[in-house]
Structure formats: C-alpha cells, structure tokens
Image (tube, grey):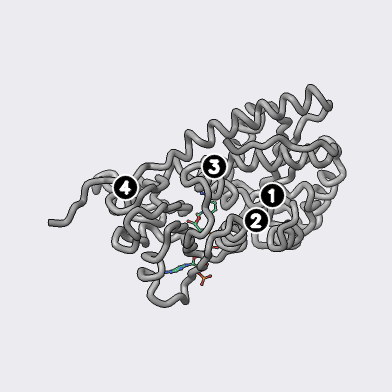
C-alpha cells in the first residue's frame, strides 16, 4: 500500500517573514536614533492594473510599519518613457530616498529595461539592475533580488549549512531562477538550473536535495518528482479557478504554486506553502534591501538581519 500520510514540515514563510520584519524595524529605529538616517522607499506604479495596485499598497503599508519613509508615485497609464525616466532621475538625486522600486509590468509604450537601467544601482532595491546582477555573479556586495534572497534565508533557517547539497532550480528568469542559482552556489550547493528545454525534468527534480520551483505553471511539479526528504521551495504564484465547481462557475479563483502541495507533503522533508511561503519573504526582503541601502549611503555597517 502506498503511504500518503503527510510527513513534510510546512515551512512557515509568513512567520519567518514577520520575525524578519521585526528585526528590520528594530535595526531601522537604531539607525535613525544613532545616525539620524531614516530609510526611505519610493514605489512607482504606472497604470491601474488591480493586482499591481494591491501589491503597491501592501508594500507601502509594510514599509511605514517598519518605521521607514514610504512614498508612492502613481502615474497614468499614458505616461511617456521620458516622464518616467525624469521621475527616476529625481528619485536618484533625493537623499531621503534609499530604495526605488518601479512596479512591473509597465505599459507597452515604455521600455522596461531602459527604466530599470536608469535606477541608481545603489538604490535598486529590487536588485534587477545589470550592475547588481554582475555584483552577485562575482561575489561583490550589492542588492540582491528579493524573492531569491528570501528563499535562501528560509532555506538556511530550515536546513542550516547548505554546503554540498544538490539544488535543482526549475526556471532561469533574471529575477528568480538565475539569482537563486548564484545565491545557492555562494552557499556551496551543487546547482542545476532546469528550464523549458531541459530533458527528463522529473528525473532531474528527483535528484534534488533542495528543489526550487520558479516556473509559473500551476502544480506542475508532482509528488513523485520529489526525492523523499527533500526541501521544496515553491516560488510560483498562479491564479486558477476555485476547487469548488459552484464557486468556479461564479468566476471565483484561488492561488496555487508550481508544486502540487498536498502530494509534496507526503514525500518532501519540508515544503513552503502558497500562499504563506515565499510571498511574505519577498516583501520582507524589500525592506531588508532598503535598510541595507540606507546604511551603505550613510557609511554605516548594517546589522545582521537573519535569525
Ligand atoms: P518567467 O516566466 O520569467 O520564467 C519561467 C521559467 O520557467 C523560464 O525559465 C522557463 O523556461 C521555465 N519554464 C516554463 N515552462 C516550463 C516547463 N514546462 N518546464 C520547465 N521549465 C519551464 O517567470 P518568473 O521567474 O518571473 O516567475 C516564476 C513564478 O514565480 C511565477 O509563478 C511568478 O508569479 C512567481 N513569482 C513569485 C514571486 C513571489 O514573491 N513569491 C516573485 C516573482 C515571481 P525558459 O527560460 O526555457 O522559457
């Protein structure tokens, strides 16, 4: 008989993120008290995409709760690239702003890479600027993309030393998969990066001690793709019809990850849920990056924020 009883630890990203935000808040208060510097984050949103509006509001509220200065710039979806670049330059020059985040996606008339490339790399709290990608690749201090940073923190808090573990990352995007690979290499993992052209993905996944799913395909990674006892980080956020057919017919939806969660719990040693796993860590790491950027701008050594 196949044993389908849950055995995995559910890795509570929400609780860990709450602790991280508490540590950032305390460090922020000390930075302001001892050095007169209050970290400031500016978020820029262009257009009225409802999901982006919710993200931006949450980011603003969390930033203020952490004792930081928060600014939100809401621009019409007809905004030109010239106007957006001018705002970025103003924020680059503002000494009270230490972090700048331009919410993606941007409207079609704007070249996203030109805008992201115009942000001062030392204020690039999303960590998307090529200068920060380069710093990460060669092991220099920079600003690291929030989702892989939060995922790595959670892995270290769960497993301790990651040295020698085989990490398989499914997805090779510039914002998740590639920086995740760099961070896990820096932790001395043996890293495999899989993507849509990889052969025999289930077998690759089964060879992982750490499996990171960053694909954007609902519940693609099944329980029998997971090595017994492996640690699974589910980065995916996918909106699918409600499991209840009546609610689904009314257009109600739910959010699932890239991993078939209930199957994973019967095989893995630990797994992050969706929601409540990597999502909260991403927002917490945005604050961590803003705090670190503020410290660097003031020439102050930042406090350690990991638990
Ligand atoms: P992208 O679409 O940029 O990248 C997806 C990657 O998955 C690509 O490298 C692609 O391969 C690979 N892929 C797609 N289909 C398959 C397949 N069938 N088999 C193997 N690999 C495949 O997505 P992102 O990296 O931006 O995001 C990934 C997921 O993470 C999404 O669900 C997103 O919503 C979520 N996300 C969550 C965040 C959070 O805060 N928790 C933050 C950021 C993202 P190829 O390169 O060959 O096309």
> Residue 140: x, y in percent?
75, 56
Residue 11, percent across and down? 42, 42
Q: CA distance from mark 4 to mark 2?
A: 29 Å
**Can residue 67 be seen here?**
yes
Q: Check whether the beta carbons of the residues at disc 1 and disc 2 lie within 8 A of each other.
A: yes
SS at circle 3? helix
Secondary structure under tag 2 reads loop
Find disc 3 in the rendering and name its residue: 281
How far is the residue under mark 3 from the one under mark 4? 25 Å
**Is ligand 1 within 8 Å of the beta carbon of the residue shown at mark 4?**
no
Which residue ends up furthest to the top in the rendered image?
Answer: 33
Q: Which residue is mark 1?
A: 102
Q: Nearer the viewer, residue 298 or 111?
A: 298
Earlier-in-chain disc, 3 versus 4: 4
Residue 302 falls left or right of residue 240: right
Q: N-terminal of the two: label 1 or label 4?
A: 1
Q: Measured from the top left, where is residue 145 in percent x and y?
A: 64, 52
**Ligand 1 under 8 Å from disc 3 Cβ:** yes
Quadrant location, the C terminus: top right
Residue 242: mark? 4
Q: Earlier in the sequence, mark 4 or mark 2?
A: 2
Marks 3 & 4, CB-CB < 8 Å contact: no
Residue named by callout 2: 106
């Amino acid at each position: 008989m196949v044993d389908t009883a849950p055995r995995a630890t559910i890795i509570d990203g929400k609780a860990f993120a709450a602790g991280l935000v508490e540590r950032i808040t305390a460090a922020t208060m000390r930075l302001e008290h001892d050095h007169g510097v209050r970290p400031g984050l500016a978020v820029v949103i262009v257009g009225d995409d409802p999901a982006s509006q919710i993200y931006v509001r949450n980011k603003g509220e969390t930033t203020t709760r952490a004792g930081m200065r928060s600014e939100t710039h809401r621009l019409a979806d007809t905004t030109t690239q010239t106007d957006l670049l001018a705002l970025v330059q103003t924020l680059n020059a503002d000494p009270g702003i230490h972090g700048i985040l331009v919410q993606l996606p941007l409207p079609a008339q704007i070249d996203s890479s030109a805008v992201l490339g115009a942000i001062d790399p030392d204020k690039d709290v999303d960590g998307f600027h090529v200068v920060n990608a380069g710093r990460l690749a060669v092991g220099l201090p920079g600003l690291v993309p929030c989702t892989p940073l939060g995922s790595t923190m959670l892995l270290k808090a769960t497993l301790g030393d990651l040295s020698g573990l085989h990490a398989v990352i499914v997805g090779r995007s510039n914002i998740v998969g590639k920086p995740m690979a760099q961070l896990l290499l820096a932790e001395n993992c043996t890293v495999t990066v899989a993507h849509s052209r990889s052969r025999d993905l289930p077998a690759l996944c089964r060879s992982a001690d750490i499996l990171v799913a960053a694909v954007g395909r609902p519940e693609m990674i099944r329980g029998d793709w997971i090595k017994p006892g492996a640690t699974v980080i589910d980065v995916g956020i996918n909106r699918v019809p409600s499991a209840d057919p009546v609610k689904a017919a009314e257009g109600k939806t739910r959010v699932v990850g890239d991993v078939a969660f209930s199957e994973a719990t019967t095989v893995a040693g630990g797994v992050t849920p969706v929601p409540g796993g990597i999502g909260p860590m991403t927002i917490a790491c945005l604050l961590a990056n803003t705090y670190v950027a503020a410290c660097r701008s003031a020439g102050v050594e930042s406090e350690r924020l990991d638990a």
